[in-house]
Amino acid sequence: MLAIGDLKINIPIIQGGMAIRASMAKLAAAVANEGGIGVIAGTALSIDELKKEIKRAKDMIVNKGGALGVNIMYATTDFMELVQVSIEAGIDVIIFGAGFSRDIFEVAKGTGVKIIPIVSSLKLAKISQKLGADAIVVEGGNAGGHLGTEKDSWDIVGEIAENVSIPVFGAGGVITPEDAERMLALGADGIQMGSRFIAAEECEVDDFFKQMYINCKEGDVVEMMSSAGLPANAIVSPYVKKVLNETTEPPKHCNRCLKKCTYKFCVNERLVKAHDGNYEEGIFFAGRDAWKINEILSVKEIFDRFKKVFKE
């Protein structure tokens, strides 16, 4: 059991908040029911959609010992609106990355909602603790999706864990129980896993997306530049090749969803296409070690394999 302030988690596993629409209520509730922190990806959801997903997840959570969280990218223009809605909906945890917010700590003060920033440097970890973060996720450049550093998680977790006193969750490269053991050996209190949960029965992406992970070979995950202005890891695909070759076209429709955007393509649109199993047009975000995933499991099966790592 891990205490994050007055929130006690039976199994210190955070399920990564994978946007767009990859981490939704069904997956988050299944993780919470197993005693972990199940996370809904709030990025690119409307206010009403996020409210509905939180309620949907809460209705499916029947076991105690876990928690329900929301992950919101700071890079989105409606970041603070989604934070406010999550707090009002009675979420347990808000996790945020792709930039850093100082205001969120003041907004959440006194609500009981735990705030967990995703950081990639000791400097930001210390700032987070000073501002009142309840825990941090330390994420390396080997993680899936948008990245904050070139360094692997294995190279940064140890130094950060040694120098902060709040709980540290290691993220990036955690696919197997052995990876989790390695992360804990560096001083992490728990882990965050994204890629392993894409290939979960409860993950609401098209089966083709899951098969992309199963069929992925070592070296198939490449770094590309997202239109959000951040590097990102994704499985090689026809559209990712266009991004790498800079032959993409600007979006025809734009709702200014990002605070900063290159407008070379719409990353949100491409992630939705991946969610729907569109191989030619989608961008399939994945951690660099997704090739280690060779089967689709239920959330319960995943937890059963990892529980032994955390037994004291």
Image (cartoon, rainbow, N blue to C red):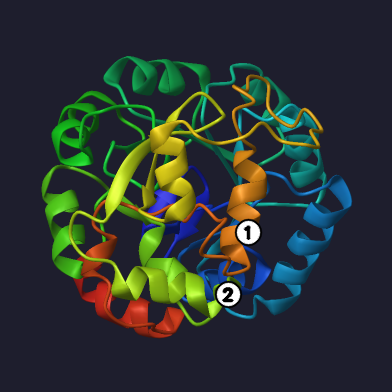
76 left or right of 186 in image: right
286 left or right of 141 in image: right
Query: Relative to 211, does residue 290 appear above or below in the rendering?
Result: above
> In the depicted view, which residue is nearer to us: 199 or 64?
199
Residue linked to disc 1: 273
**Which amino acid does the dot numbered 1 rest on?**
Lys
**Which amino acid does the dot numbered 2 rest on?**
Asp
Dot 1: within a 10 Å radius of its alpha carbon, few (fewer than 14), some, or many (20 or more) residues?
many
Separation (CA) of disc 1 from disc 2: 10 Å
Q: Secondary structure at mark 2?
A: loop
User: Earlier along the polypeptide chain: callout 1 or callout 2?
Assistant: 2
The answer to whether residue 31 is visible is yes
Query: Relative to 266, does residue 30 appear above or below in the rendering?
Result: below
Q: Quadrant of residue 39?
A: bottom right
Residue linked to disc 2: 206
Identify the residue at image location x=50%, y=34%.
247
Identify the residue at image location x=76%, y=49%.
45
Dot 2: within a 10 Å radius of its alpha carbon, few (fewer than 14), some, or many (20 or more) residues?
some
Identify the residue at image location x=38%, y=61%.
195
Identify the residue at image location x=36%, y=59%.
12
Q: Quadrant of residue 101?
A: top right
Q: Position of residue 13 (x, y in %)?
A: 38, 60
Q: Position of residue 35 (x, y in %)?
A: 46, 70
> In the depicted view, which residue is nearer to us: 162 or 29?
29
Give the quadrant of the N terminus.
bottom left
Q: Quadrant of residue 235?
A: bottom left
Q: Badges 1 and 2: C-beta atoms under 8 Å apart?
A: no
Q: Secondary structure at mark 1?
A: helix
